Amino acid sequence: MSTKSSSVAPLDYLSFLYLLVFFAAVSAVMCQSNQGSIGVCNGRLGSDLPPEQEVVELYKTSGIKRMRIYDPNQATLTALQGSGIELVLDVPNADLESLQSDATHWVQTNVVQYFPATRIRYIAVGNEVDPEKETSGFVPLVLPAMQNIYKALSQFGLQDQIKVSTATYSALLMNTSPPSNAIFKDMAFMEPIISFLAQTRAPLLANIYPYFAYIYSQGVELPYALFTAPGVVVQDGPYGYQNLFDAMVDGVYSALEKAGGGDVEVVVSESGWPSDGGVAATRENAETYYRNLIDHVKRGSPKRPGKAIETYLFAMFDENNKPGEKSEQHFGLFYPNKQPKYQFILNNV
């Protein structure tokens, strides 16, 4: 017995040490995956915005590690080179038609020329294309453009490094209360897109705005939209919802599941709250929303607990030329002079 014990004990001890190292490594990876989940959208619809190089420097000094831009602005793509900032690069809706035949040129000009010095992470092919709205004419163009961009990336061996998606929004869903009932309104439009995302292991980008749900939907209380409700507001089977953001994100997940995309991840490509120009659009409400959102997304949603939600705040600056309601011009975290609008600090988000 003593001989057997002396020969086995060292092996058990080494195995124990190995397990400690293994679980420490796993823990470190999990912690890293929950950090840096916040990006900020860089809209450029303003007459008084700083030059692109100054914008990139402000991202860096503010600790913002991810950016979304809405067109392949060459000055921004150049300024991002070597910055370490990861990028969501949009294909504007107006460019979708040209990609039906010439996606390779688009990728060469706007991606290959800059990558990997500019760390392009996703290409968002179209933004908020809706079969029921004025963007309905772009509906038949979205999926072919996504497929063509993917094929063009494949020509350069970049199809696994840069994911191709499209940016949707909540208006594409119906039956959203409770979230588990949510489904895409137009499955003929969305189901083939979801199939493409599942096949290429790309996320669905979704613009999530509790602000607009609050001002346009009856029965939504302000604390529920601002993450300040004292308890569960909506119970959906085993899931309790204390804030509207979670309910909207999980509504997208439920719709994905019904469209055959249960393994497709949701990336929140926009979310924000205006500080002026509309109902409940105050600096106090906006600061409350942004601060709570930044803290909350690290913890995931009820359907995906513990998994940080990659989220892009809208937006970096107030944009005085942005069309639509007056509130659209007041979503900035910073004023155009680069002064912060709010007291919370973005560093290390």
Image (cartoon, helix red, strand yellow):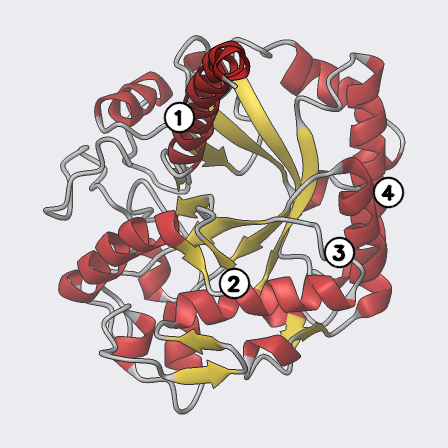
Mark number displayed over residue 24: 1
In the displayed structure, 122 sits above or below 20; it is below
**Do the residues under discs 4 and 3 have CB atoms within 8 angstroms?**
no
Left/right placement of residue 52 relative to residue 126 reads: left
Instruction: Judge depth for marks 4 and 2 and give the one in front.
Output: 2
Of the two numbered discs 2 and 1 on the same chain, state the one appearing first in sequence. 1
Distance from Cα at disc 4 to Cα at disc 3:
19 Å
Name the amino acid type tagged 4: Pro
**Residue 149 visible in rendering:** yes
Q: Residues within 10 Å of mark 2 (few under 14, many from 20)?
A: many
**Do the residues under discs 4 and 2 have CB atoms within 8 angstroms?**
no
Residue at the right extreme? Answer: 101
Distance from Cα at disc 4 to Cα at disc 2:
26 Å
Name the amino acid type tagged 3: Gly
Left/right placement of residue 182 relative to residue 96 reads: left
Q: Which residue is mark 3?
A: 261
Q: Which residue is mark 4?
A: 144
Distance from Cα at disc 4 to Cα at disc 1:
44 Å
Q: Secondary structure at mark 1?
A: helix
Instruction: Judge depth for marks 1 and 3 and give the one in front.
Output: 1
Of the two numbered discs 4 and 1 on the same chain, state the one appearing first in sequence. 1
